[in-house]
Image (tube, rainbow, N blue to C red):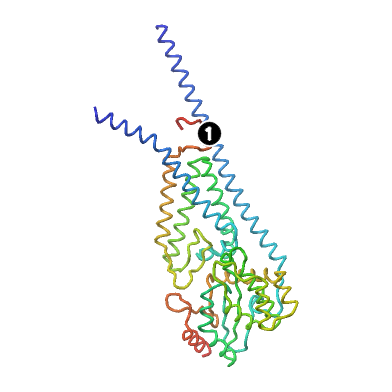
Amino acid sequence: MSKGGRARDRANARRVVEQQQAAERRRRVTMWTSAVVVLVLVVAGLVGWRVLAGQQKSTATALTTPPGVVDSSTAWSVGSGPVVVDVYEDFMCPVCRNFESASGATIKQLVTDKKITVRYHTVAILDASSSGTQYSTRSAGAAAAAAIDGKFIEYHDVLYANQPQEGSTGLTNAKLIDLGKSVGLTSTAFVDAINNKTYDAWVAKVTDTFSSRGYNGTPTIVVAGKLLQGPNQTVPTTAEFTQAVTQAAG
Amino acid sequence: MGVTVETRQQSARWAAAWPWISTAARLGLAAVFLTAGGLKVGDLAASGRSVNAYRLMSFDAAKVVGAIQPFLEISIGLLLLVGLAMRLSAAISALLLVIFIAGIASAWARGLRIDCGCFSKGGDLAAGRTAEYGLEILRDLGFLVLAGILLIKPRTKFSVDGLLMGPADF
C-alpha cells in the first residue's frame, strides 16, 4: 500500500471515530435535556398544586361565616314563601343588573305576598374584571356586612343602581361605605367589615359552592331546585320566572 | 443534468431555511403558551372554575387541574423559548394542544355554552355572546401545526440544544 493510501485510511478511521463520538455526545445531550424537561414540568405541576393548597388553607383560616346565613351557610334568605328561589349573582355582572331591573320588582312582590323565599348567593366570579381591585369579592363582602345589620335587600339594590363598568376599577371601599350610609347602614361593624375584608373568605366559599353545584355563569336562577333558563340557555324573562314559580307552587 | 443541479440547489436552500422556519415556530409557540399561562396564573380559583365549566370532572379535580395548568403552560413556554430538548418539548406541546382541542370539541358536541378559557378565565358566556368553538379549534389547530413543524424539524437557531450539541449536524 502506498504511503498516501495509508494516510487516507488513517484520516478516514479518525473521521469515523469522530462521528461516533459526536453521535454519542448528541445521544447524551438529548437524554439529559429530556430529563431536565420532564423534571421542570413535574416541578411546575407540584408548584401549582402547592400554591392551590396554600390558597385554600389561607381561605379556610380567614373564613368568618356571617351569622344568619342558610343553605350550607352560603346564602341570604329573604321572605317566607313556600317556593324556594335561588339567585346566584355577582355585583359586577351587567346581565345580573339587567335581570334585577327586569324582574326585581316582581321578585319583591312575590316575597311580600309570601309566595317565595329567595336565597341570594353573592358569588364573585368577575374579580378579574375590576383591574385587580377584586370588586366582586369586596362588594359581596360588604353586602354580607349589610345583611348582618338587616339591610341586605336595600344594599343589594343600591349596589346594582351604582354598578361600575366591567373592566373599570370598581367602586372604592369608601364608596361602598358611602352607599351603605345612603340606605342607613352606619354601624362601625359595617365599616370595619368592609375595610378589614372580614367576609371575603366567606365569599370565596360561596363561589366554590356555586361551582361545585355545576353552575358557571351569573345570574343563575333556580326555582324549587330546578335550573330556570329561557330558550337557548338565556336568562329567564319575568314572565318565564313568574310561570316557573306558579308551576312550582302547584 | 441542469434539473439535478437546480434540485440540489433548491434542497440546499431548504436545508438552510428550515432552522429559521423552526425557530419562528418555536418562538411563536413559546409566546402562545406563555400568554395563555400568564393570563391564568394570577387567579387559580378562576382557572379551576374555567376547567369546571367543561363538566368533564368533579369540581375538586377541576380545581387541581385548573391550578396546575397555568404553571405547566408557562413552563413549556419557557422550555420552548430557550429551546431545550426540542423534539420532546414539541411533543408535549402537541399533546397539550390535542387535549385542549378535544375538550373544546366535547363542549361543542354537548351543546355547552362556555368560553373555552384558552386565553382567559373562561366560564359560561354572558347573554348575547355565542360560543365560537369552530374558531377556537381552528386556532388551536394552527398552534398544532407549529408544534408539528418542530417535531419534524427540531433544529433551531439560538437554542440551548444547539449550544450543547454544537451548531452543526444534529
Is A247 drawn above or below residue B96 in the view shown? below
Secondary structure under tag 1 reads: helix
- B5 vs A179, nearest the viewer: A179
Q: Please name the residue shown 55% across and 38% down the image.
A: A33
Is B111 drawn above or below residue A45 in the view shown? below
Find residue B53 and report its horizontal and vertical position in percent: 52, 66
- A72 vs A116, nearest the viewer: A116
Find residue B40 and report its horizontal and vertical position in percent: 56, 58
Find residue A98 and report its horizontal and vertical position in percent: 51, 79
Name the residue that disc number 1 marks: B163
Numbered-mark total:
1
Q: Please name the residue shown 53% across and 41% down the image.
A: B82
Q: Please name the residue shown 59% across and 45% down the image.
A: A40
The N terminus of chain A, quarter of image: top left
Residue at the outermost bottom position: A113
Is A15 drawn above or below residue B167 in the view shown? above
The answer to which image quadrant residue A193 occupies is bottom right
Find residue A74 and report its horizontal and vertical position in percent: 64, 75
Q: What's the residue type where badge 1 is placed?
A: Leu
**Residue A110 shown left or right of residue A146 in the figure:** left
Q: Residues within 10 Å of mark 1 (few under 14, many from 20)?
A: few
- A239 vs A128, nearest the viewer: A128
Q: Please name the residue shown 65% across and 56% down the image.
A: A51
The answer to which image quadrant residue A75 occupies is bottom right
